[in-house]
Image: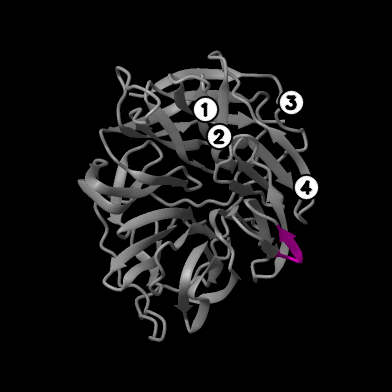
Amino acid sequence: MHRDRGVHTTRSWKGILPAALLMGSMSCGGAEPPSERTPRPVPPVALPGEEPSPSVTDPVQLVPAPAEPREPLARPWFQRLGGPQDDTAEGLAVDGAGELTLVWLSTPREDAGREGVPGQRRALTVARYGPDGQSRWSREFPRVRVDAPRVGATLEGEVFLSGNASLDAVDFGLGAAQDGFLVKFSSEGKPLWQLRAGQKAWGLAVDGAGGVLVVGEEWTPGGVVPVLAHHEGEGAFRWTRQLGVVGEGSALHAVALAPSGRALLAGRLEGALVVDGQTFGEAGGQGLVLLAFEADGRLAWGKELRGVEGRVTGLAVAEEGTVVLVGEHGNLLSWAGRTLSGPGAFVLASSLEGTESWGHSLSCGEQPASPVVATEAGGRVVAACGQVLSEYAPEGTPRDSRVLSLEDCTEGSCRVTSTTLVILPAGELGLAGTGRYGADGEAWDQDAFLRLLTP
């Protein structure tokens, strides 16, 4: 089992976050628990240029019913999680009641600067915590090798887990899961069903009706093909489509869902990609691309930033329609009339129809890392990069920026890196990442952390 080092509370976040950081609700979805079986998918929609399959269900509005408001917690809290090995927080989700689900990886110390230690292990852990920081349940899957695990939660608390079991199969209680996988758990952590989600699965987004959108890829003789699949709550396909072959080095990994059902996909594109007759990128070129798909899976619009060296690491959609993406770039990037110099991190916003709104460079502090982002219903944006948390007004005006620290640092020099964040229904911020304790020596320990920040 994992080592839970307890809940630490403080009475304010003075020096960590401004009181202005009050976030609203986050859009998720819910569904009745299905039976314990692997679902049989229904046929997918047609590929571009073909007629849609008659089995495709009609689009539905995915606007969730608002969760009952609750009073914000009086005090923030902090959880240090892990053991003697390296522990890394990989994904975080919140349901309609403010319950937090975290997934983290445990890997042996295998770098050149440190020796292995007794008791270190390899594992994947999925755990749930209440908005008060108390543990609800924890499930550890030992001795597994999993890449890019991500979690999502419905309003009622059911949990989706995706990831890649490339070397060895993983058993979540439903038999062997290989390649890219998608698993659904009940709100109590009981496995319900699982599906193969491609050769690789890179991310997911939960809709307001309890379904889930997954982005993955298949490997074909012609090259890598990005795949989008929107599943109902019981696992059947709502729609799915394979895009064209992309060049080596492409990474269309960031995905999000708008309340209307429109799906967003963003990432790095090498070469050219043709989607529903529209060409993005060019042979021998590189750039960033943002694609929007209608609720039935057809392309709505696309934007590209040709020539930009970089990648997209986070994508979010506010309830009123603001699309926000964050990432890293190595050269000049132009957006909404501004030119951002590189190398560095960025945060960009557009309307749900693709109109560029605003963009800024992101500060990451002394420990640069892949930036992540969350939005509130009113359009306020919160981004984390490394050890810096930044807030923006809906129109893009910077509100504040704060450097984060580890509250329980007793090992001397400690370093914090944020890896994922969510906004709770009452406005608190759930933040997860990794902390290096005693980082100046060769025997430092890396643990995952989960914290709640409140006004």
**Which is the main secondary structure of the residues drawn in magenta?**
strand
Q: Nearer the viewer, residue 292 or 366?
A: 366
Q: Amino acid at mark 3?
A: Gly
Q: Residue 52, how many percent across, how many down?
A: 39, 82
Q: Secondary structure at mark 2?
A: strand
Mark 3 highlights which residue?
A: 15
Labelled disc at residue 417: 2
Labelled disc at residue 435: 1
Q: Residue 442, how many percent across, how many down?
A: 44, 21
Looking at the image, residue 273 sits to the left or right of residue 404; the answer is left
The residue shown at (46%, 26%) is 447
Q: Amino acid at mark 2?
A: Thr
Tag 2 and tag 1, C-beta contact below 8 Å: yes
Disc 4 and disc 1: Cα gap in Å?
27 Å
Q: Secondary structure at mark 1?
A: strand
Q: Amino acid at mark 1?
A: Gly
Disc 2 and disc 1: Cα gap in Å?
6 Å
Q: Which residues are magenta?
A: 335-340
Q: Amino acid at mark 4?
A: Pro
Above/below status of 425 relative to 442: below
